[in-house]
Amino acid sequence: MKTKFIAALAASTALLAPMAMAEEMANDMTLVSWGGAYQKSQVNAYSAPYMEMHPDVKVVWDESSNEAVAKLRAMNEAGNVTWDLVDVVAADAIRLCDEGLAMEIDPDKDLAAAPDGTSAADDFGDLLVSDCFIPQIVYSTTFGYRTDLVGDTPPDDICDVFDLEAYPGKRALEKRPINNMEWALLCDGVAKDEVYDVLATPEGQEKALAKLGTIKDNVIWWSAGADTPQLLADGEVVMGSTYNGRLFSVIEEQKQPVAMLWDAQVFDLDGWIIPAGLPADRLARVKDFLMFATDTQRLADQAKYISYGPARASSAPLVGQHADLGIEMAPHMPTDPNNAKNTFLYNYEFWADYRDDIDAKFQAWLAK
């Protein structure tokens, strides 16, 4: 029996360098994510089937991804890294990699090839934006609005967010500068291809904050991705930004009177980083999990539960219907041509370089 098990294990990882045997792997993993519908999709597509294959493995989920950079810095300073795998946005992955807090990976060694033999590096392609980053999904931050609170002319332009006369009422915006500053500059007349050049200057930053100041008194600031859907469902805001998958959930699953405003949606990437310095047994378990959880089928499976586009090219053709609703998921993806007529591309390198300084300026502005 043992010989058969070893042969099966070897066959399943034939495209990798030999990994530690199962008995050398830790049986506990702490995975860090964002909570809500997104984390649920990860549980359904990744950790639950992995635990079925490995019944001795215990997975604990931590919902602290929005604080990942600060917490990993603190853990590293204390010499006690308790997380095993962390879901972060691409810009945070770049920062953590630059600071030596995330481990570099070799895509063609650590990740499975596509079913047709295409290497993982080629299958993920340009989405491998950092040596430490393992992409999972393409998502967007965009706006939802209450269909019963916008009158006969629903908003269809990002600048409608700043139009209090046509669309009176509260807005929900994330309590950080990212995306808000870009939208503000776009709606203050800055050309799309000049936004980051302008935002790199103190004058441009003040310009963005001044535009945001025109609606500041009508903003409810959110920190968790679940906040805006709840505010929309409760009718406390007329429109609000959040991740497109959160809006899909409130619209299609909860059947709330909410619709999507796709204009100037900001494309971004989300994926895993491995904290630097894990003990050998924990690292072996994490790598075994990643091999499974980032393969072509698993990334396609996540799209059964949430409307985020899989990061692997080979996964896209496998995206089908929602697991519970039975609706086709492709039209709900941010990358669908009907939804992507006017997108804004998030600049990872800009925010990796400017995040701390602009964060400080933004928080000071909020406190005024």
Image (cartoon, rainbow, N blue to C red):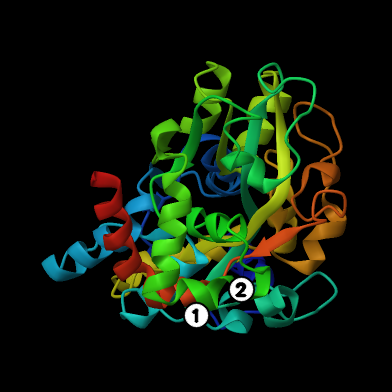
- Type of amino acid under label 1: Ile
Residue 156 location, quadrant: top right
Give the spatial CA distance, label 2 vs label 1: 9 Å
Quadrant containing the N terminus is: bottom right
Tell me if 242 is positioned left or right of 247 in this view.
Answer: left
Quadrant containing the C terminus is: top left
Residues at circles 2 and 1 in contact by the CB criterion of under 8 Å: yes
Residue 61 location, quadrant: top left
Position of residue 270 measured from the top left corner of the image (x, y, whole percent) = 55, 59
The numbered disc on residue 218 is none
What secondary structure is found at the residue carrying circle 1?
loop
Q: Earlier in the sequence, mark 2 or mark 1?
A: 1
Residue on which the image places disc 2: 111
Residue at point 44% right, 34% down?
Answer: 219
- Type of amino acid under label 2: Leu
On screen, residue 301 above or below 165: below
Tell me if 89 is positioned left or right of 309 in this view.
Answer: left
Residue on which the image places disc 1: 105
Q: Is residue 87 visible?
A: no
On screen, residue 111 above or below 224: below
Residue at point 51% right, 74% down?
Answer: 198
Tell me if 339 is positioned left or right of 361 in this view.
Answer: right
Frontmost residue, 266 versus 45: 266
Frontmost residue, 148 versus 206: 206
Residue at point 46% right, 43% down?
Answer: 214
Residue 191 location, quadrant: bottom right
